[in-house]
Amino acid sequence: MSTLLEVKDLKKHFPVKGDSLFTKEMKTVKAVDGVSFTVNKGETLGLVGESGCGKSTTGRTILKLVEPTSGEIYFRGENITSFQGEKMRKLRKEMQIIFQDPYASLNPRKTIEQIITEPMKIFNIPKRDRNKKLNRLLDVVGLSSYHKVRYPHEFSGGQRQRIGIARALALEPELVICDEPVSALDVSIQAQVVNLMEDLQEEFNLTYIFIAHDLSVVHHISDRVAVMYLGQIVETGQVDELYKNPKHPYTQALLSAIPEADPTIQKERIVVKGDLPSPSNPPQGCKFHTRCPYAEEICRTVNPALKQVSTGGQQAACHFVKEVVEEY
Amino acid sequence: MSAEPHISPPQLEVSKPKAHPKSSSLWLDALSRLVKSKTSFIGLCLILLLILTAIFAPVIATYDPTEVQLLDRYQAPSSEHWLGTDELGRDIFSRIVYGSRISIQVGVIAVGISAIVGILLGGIAGYFGRWVDQIIMRIIDILMAFPSILLAIALVAVLGPSLTNAMIAVGIVGVPQFARIVRSTVLSVKETEYIEAARAIGAKSNRILFQHVLPNCTAPIIVQATLGIGTAILDAAGLSFLGLGAQPPAPEWGAMLSDGRAALQTSPWVITFPGIAIFLVVLAFNLFGDGLRDALDPRLKQ
């Protein structure tokens, strides 16, 4: 497997105005604060975390819909961090995004045909090919050709999300960033859309970055998972290993919150105390120490780096997890 | 909807999907709300009456509007001259009928100028932001600092008095309103996810602005255009009253007011009827525009 995307120490800080009208002091919200990961061709990386932890911003920064503050993004081995204007526009053919809200992400004034063929028009695909492709795309996402002339408001949430998927696939991208693609949908529809996305991955040999806060959905679709907390990755690893044996206390708490379908199973729920600290004023040291049940003095001063915690490639950022040195 | 105009709104909703698979219920909803409002319906009727009068002016008018009959000057309304005659013996009814053509022309062309310039400036300012926004909006602020009629007079003074120049002047005076409304709408539309989606599929700025942002700003533009026609007609009539717009013998309502003011005490009909015509037309566009605003954006109703 070859590496398709590599992100190195990515940071995105948003400036926000100070509280007072008269102070010039600018605060920054550290939405993404030093995130590094790689995505291999054909795999799905799940990016999980609670709201406001920076997972969506990470996705948008990779696509350069948001300019990164610092860090490097390599796509197919090429550093695209400084790509601007026309150069970046050309690259958009290879990386696409599926949005969270299917009601907001489709232009209400355009028909389905216009929405799905627009990317092809922009990249000058001849009209005959466009129509052929449109019919095929409608077919693979499970819509009928008579839907072409309709407007977005005439569709249900699940159908709209299929339209969004068809638009993202219109240019046959290599990488698709799925920004909570099912969290706005009914549970019954979620399964359909997730399965559709899995089928499409196989058919078009897609690579996904799947952003979500629903852990069971992520477990289902991902090969590898990265858990984010306050703009940083706290744990990452193969999905089965990480779900079975989470090392970081935050991951443990997250996973213990997944409801069990069997009422006879007594589950020990780890409840994290307190609220998510403000990303404009994150805690010193380990960002999780304010809510961590195991926090000690070192956590308040030193921010732990990701370290190898299993032979399977699992990594966690916690002072109290034993490092495992991989043996060759 | 043109096939079944008399169907009541609820039925219209139900029959819609089969009959009109392409129609947008957004507009249908707005239409049904518009027809329900009595005041905007009255406005709409008056506007239709004005348009029909303008189209069929030669049929409706009883005399040539510019024909001078010096023997018949200052005649009171009678069966022969329905609304009387002016100082040159011209039939006032016929002049008002033909004047509707000028008023519509002035309203539409002046608002057209305001709209095209205003939408472009406002759209560019709102979409590109930063220094572009600063420069454009400061120019707009300068335009707004002048009282509208004063600015129009100044422009006509530079361009020279004629109906065409009056339309241009009134059009320029109306630009700031359009620019500001379009800018604020663009500011909110450009933050939506479908605009981000357009960027993600590699659309260029001008494509995003003209194909994605501006088509979603139509509702406030339509409302402003309707209200603007009333104001434009009033301003143009004001210019003509001052002798800066339509030139004699054109049957322009504002110019007719000006002609008749010398005889206000002895022959009040010369000035009364053109005044009523201006009043009704401006009222009609204001009522209809208000109704349109309520219909297109129910949130603004408060």
Image (cartoon, coloured by chain):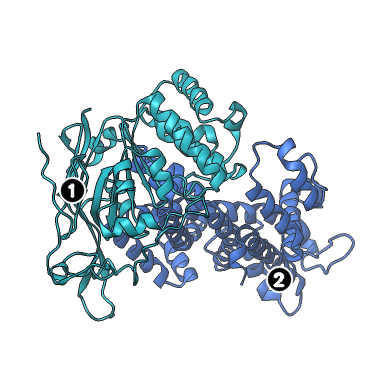
Q: Is residue A252 left or right of residue B271?
A: left
Relative image position of residue B256 (x, y in whole percent): 66, 65
Between label 1 and label 2, give the one nearer the viewer: 1
Residue B163 vs A127, above or below: the answer is: below
* Residue in front for this viewpoint, B199 or B127: B199
Q: Position of residue A176 (x, y in %)?
A: 35, 37
Q: Which mark is residue B201?
A: none
Give the amino acid type for the residue marked by disc 1 in the picture. Val
Which chain, by letter, is cyan? A
* Residue positioned 70% across, 37% down in the render: B20
Q: Position of residue B146 (x, y in %)?
A: 42, 71
**Does residue B141 appear in the picture of this structure?**
yes
Residue at the (60%, 36%) spot, across then down? A150
* Residue under the image location 39 percent in, 40 percent down: B207
Q: Colour of chain B?
A: blue
Residue drawn 74% across and 66% down?
B39
Chain of the residue that carries numbered disc 2 in the rendered image:
B
In the foreground, B190 or B17? B17
Q: CA distance from mark 1 to mark 2?
A: 94 Å
Around disc 1, counting alpha carbons within 10 Å, would you say few (fewer than 14), some (14 to 19), or many (20 or more)? Answer: many
Residue type, mark 2 in image: Ile
Image coordinates of residue B156 in percent, x first then y, are: 45, 61
Choose top left, top right, bottom left or bottom right for residue A205.
Answer: top left
Q: Quadrant of the N terminus of chain B?
A: top right
Image side of residue A252 versus residue B22, left or right: left
Mark yes or no: residue A121 visible: no
Q: Based on the displayed image, in which of its 4 quarters is residue B271 positioned?
A: bottom right
- Residue tagged by mark 2? B271
User: Which residue is label 1 attached to?
Assistant: A309
